[in-house]
Amino acid sequence: MALKKLFIAICLVTLLVGCGASSSQNESASTDNTPTTTEPGSTNTDKFDSDEDNLDPGTSEPTPEPMQNTTPEPMQNTTPEPMQNTTPVIIPAPTPAPTPAPTPEPTPEPTPEPTPEPTPEPTPEPTPEPEPDTSAEISWDAPTKRENGDDLDQLDIKGYKILYTNSDTSEVKTLTVGYLARSIKLQALSAGDWGFQVSTLDTNDVYSEYSEAVYKTIY
């Protein structure tokens, strides 16, 4: 569109320049043929006379050159060209960026249970050596007959006499207990082989014979 306007302006300038040149030539010709006036009401004929004198008798007047064709060139068709089709172009919507999948949180490794320290086995206390057993426990049954074979009533029994003897040391000891006693534990016996016997005492203070001996070794 700008080029068209520029071209039109150039054509107009050219046209105006041509018209100006033609007008100048006409004015020059008119000036040469116009009588010069010196005083008001008088005509100066010197110029005409000199022109006639200077003309060559056998020469015709010079033919004026034909004027340049000042016909303006036809203007270029200024009909605006149809505008280019401005059909709107559909701009595609931007493809949305895919939503990144959330990074899965790492599964924490299970904390290993601490290995229990082995329970130290208790150091067994040394078994104390047993103190030497210096006791002896003996028991008996109440007699039911006398030595002669007669029956012995339990109410006739007054008590019992224990005889114990150490055959290694020749120690001899006795101990009397009541009629209800049926056993006894003898303490603090010395080391050696001990023999134990029992005799029954009746209400008449008569002792029966000692029973057969039983033995225990004291260490």
Image: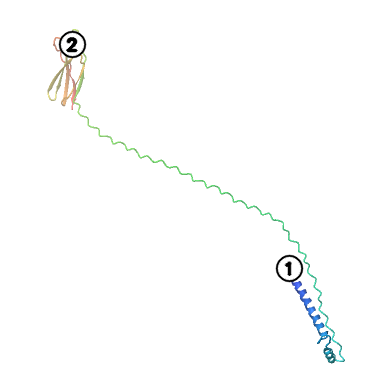
Q: Give whichever of 74, 22 is nearer the camera.
A: 22
Instruction: Give the numbered dot on residue 157.
Output: 2
Residue 66, image quadrant: bottom right
Query: Which residue is farthest front?
Result: 40
Q: Position of residue 101 (x, y in %)?
A: 55, 47
Residue 191, image quadrant: top left
Q: Give whichever of 36, 83 is nearer the camera.
A: 36
Does residue 1 appear to the left or right of 125 in the view shown? right
- The answer to whether 66 is drawn above or below residue 135 in the figure is below
Which amino acid does the dot numbered 2 rest on? Ile
For image coordinates 76% across by 72% down, the residue present is 12
- The answer to whether 68 is drawn above or below residue 185 in the figure is below
Label 1 environment density (alpha carbons within 10 Å; few <14, some 14–19, many ≥20): few
User: The residue tagged with tag 1: helix, strand or loop?
Assistant: helix
Q: Give whichever of 80, 98 is nearer the camera.
A: 80
Instruction: Give the numbered dot on residue 189.
Output: none
Separation of marks 1 and 2 at Cα, in angstroms: 170 Å
Tell me how the rendering is colored.
rainbow
User: The residue tagged with tag 2: helix, strand or loop?
Assistant: strand
Q: Give whichever of 97, 156 is nearer the camera.
A: 97
Which amino acid does the dot numbered 1 rest on? Lys
Q: Where is residue 175 in the image (x, y as percent from the top left)?
A: 15, 18
Residue pointed to by mark 1: 5
For image coordinates 19% across by 9% down, the residue present is 155
Q: Position of residue 133 (x, y in %)?
A: 20, 26
Q: Quadrant of the N terminus?
A: bottom right
Q: Quadrant of the C terminus?
A: top left
Q: Position of residue 43 (x, y in %)?
A: 84, 87
Mark 1 vs 2, N-terminal side: 1
